[in-house]
Image (tube, helix red, strand yellow):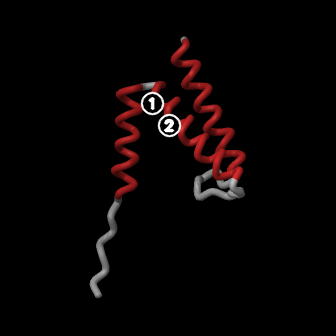
């Protein structure tokens, strides 16, 4: 059976997220940070303590996303 070639879908997703962040500025950062925070909050409440994210510990990921959201909010206000 022939093996399927590697599909670098993540790179397309990353480029799309970067484009949205570039076009929408801090609003996009705030939106993605809030979405990520909500997702990790729900996962942590369900028992997830280790993530595939670079930071690994979900508490660190939540802190990171919270700080991103606050920074974006500050940029919007200022």
Which residue is the extreme one toward the left?
2
| Residue 41 % position (x, y) | 66, 45
Q: Give the residue number, with chain letter if any, for mark 1.
A: 28
Relative to residue 62, is residue 52 depicted above or below? Answer: below
Badge 1 marks a residue whose secondary structure is: helix
Label 1 close to label 2 by CB (< 8 Å)? yes
| Residue 46 % position (x, y) | 69, 55
Relative to residue 10, is residue 38 depicted above or below? Answer: above
Residue at horizontal 62 percent and vertical 26 percent from the top: 70
In the rendered structure, the answer to whether residue 21 lies left or right of residue 75 reads: left
Badge 2 marks a residue whose secondary structure is: helix
Q: Give the residue number, with chain letter if any, for mark 2.
A: 32
Q: Residues within 10 Å of mark 1 (few under 14, many from 20)?
A: some
Q: Residues within 10 Å of mark 2 (few under 14, many from 20)?
A: some
In the rendered structure, the answer to whether residue 49 lies left or right of residue 12 reads: right
Q: Quadrant of the N terminus?
A: bottom left
Mark drawn on residue 44: none
In the rendered structure, the answer to whether residue 42 lies left or right of residue 3 reads: right
């Amino acid at each position: 059976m022939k093996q399927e070639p590697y599909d670098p879908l993540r790179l397309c997703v990353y480029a799309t997220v970067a484009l949205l962040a570039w076009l929408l500025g801090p609003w996009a950062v705030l939106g993605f940070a809030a979405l990520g925070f909500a997702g990790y909050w729900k996962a942590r409440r369900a028992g997830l303590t280790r993530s595939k994210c670079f930071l690994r510990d979900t508490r660190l990921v939540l802190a990171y996303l919270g700080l991103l959201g606050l920074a974006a909010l500050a940029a919007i206000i200022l």
